């Protein structure tokens, strides 16, 4: 059990650090510097390596492993998550998300700071039915599979993190874009699309 506790603590610390470093108010001017987003992405990836190593070392104790064909339903959920993630990637400026756009702008125009454009707020594609499709894809991928006990721990912590992350991100977007984002928020659900039943 000690390994599970250690893994849980490290995963929570990772999530907290990931959120704090993404907080534009906390990071101040550093947050908008041309190199910061790419640095944040690389650091977040590197810090996953020891966490993944601990995960691998944990025993494979089955928690929820339904037999075939019931397991197909879980894999279907995971497949939907992959599709949502792929479709979402078409709706975002992924160069900006990864920090590559900021680096290109700096070396091309010497733009030291990067500011989000209101054009980023769109109601096109998947963003017309859900505000945070990447988080939705993550949740579907987490739960769309048979689970070991270590997976249950991972899923609970990351699901809470995704929800809190979406809330925190919206706080930032409202501060940056004001009424433009408030209007979008009013019309589009946060994580799960609304199902409209025909009368």
Image (tube, grey):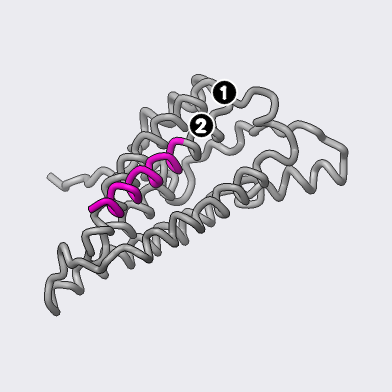
Residue 190 on image: x %, y %: 35, 37
Say above or below: 177 vs 62.
Answer: above
Q: Secondary structure at mark 1?
A: helix
Which quadrant of the figure has residue 177?
Answer: top right
Per the image, the residue denoted by label 1 is: 26
Q: Secondary structure at mark 2?
A: helix
Per the image, the residue denoted by label 2 is: 20
Residue 12 lies in the magenta-colored region? yes
Q: Which residues are magenta?
A: 1-16
Residue 10 on image: x %, y %: 40, 45
By secondary structure, the bulk of the magenta-drawn segment is best described as: helix
Residue 155 on image: x %, y %: 29, 52
43 with respect to 80 (left or right): right
Say whether marks 1 and 2 touch (CB < 8 Å). Answer: yes
97 with respect to 49 (left or right): right
Assess disc 1: are there few (<14), some (14-19) or many (≥20) residues with their C-alpha within 10 Å of its C-alpha: few
């Amino acid at each position: 059990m000690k390994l599970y506790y250690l893994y849980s603590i490290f995963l929570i610390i990772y999530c907290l650090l990931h959120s704090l470093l993404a907080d534009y108010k906390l990071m101040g001017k550093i947050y908008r510097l041309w190199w910061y987003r790419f640095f944040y992405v690389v650091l977040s990836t590197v810090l996953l390596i020891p966490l993944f190593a601990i995960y691998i070392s944990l025993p494979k104790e089955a928690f929820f492993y339904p037999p075939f064909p019931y397991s197909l339903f879980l894999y279907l959920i995971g497949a939907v998550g992959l599709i949502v993630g792929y479709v979402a990637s078409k709706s975002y400026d992924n160069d900006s998300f990864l920090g590559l756009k900021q680096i290109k702008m700096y070396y091309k125009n010497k733009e030291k700071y990067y500011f989000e454009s209101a054009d980023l707020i769109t109601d096109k594609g998947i963003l017309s039915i859900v505000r945070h499709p990447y988080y939705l894809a993550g949740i579907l991928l987490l739960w769309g599979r048979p689970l070991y006990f270590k997976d249950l721990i991972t899923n609970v912590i990351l699901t809470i993190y995704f929800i809190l992350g979406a809330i925190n991100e919206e706080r930032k977007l409202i501060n940056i874009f004001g009424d433009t984002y408030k209007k979008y928020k009013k019309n589009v659900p946060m994580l799960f699309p609304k199902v409209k039943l025909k009368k």
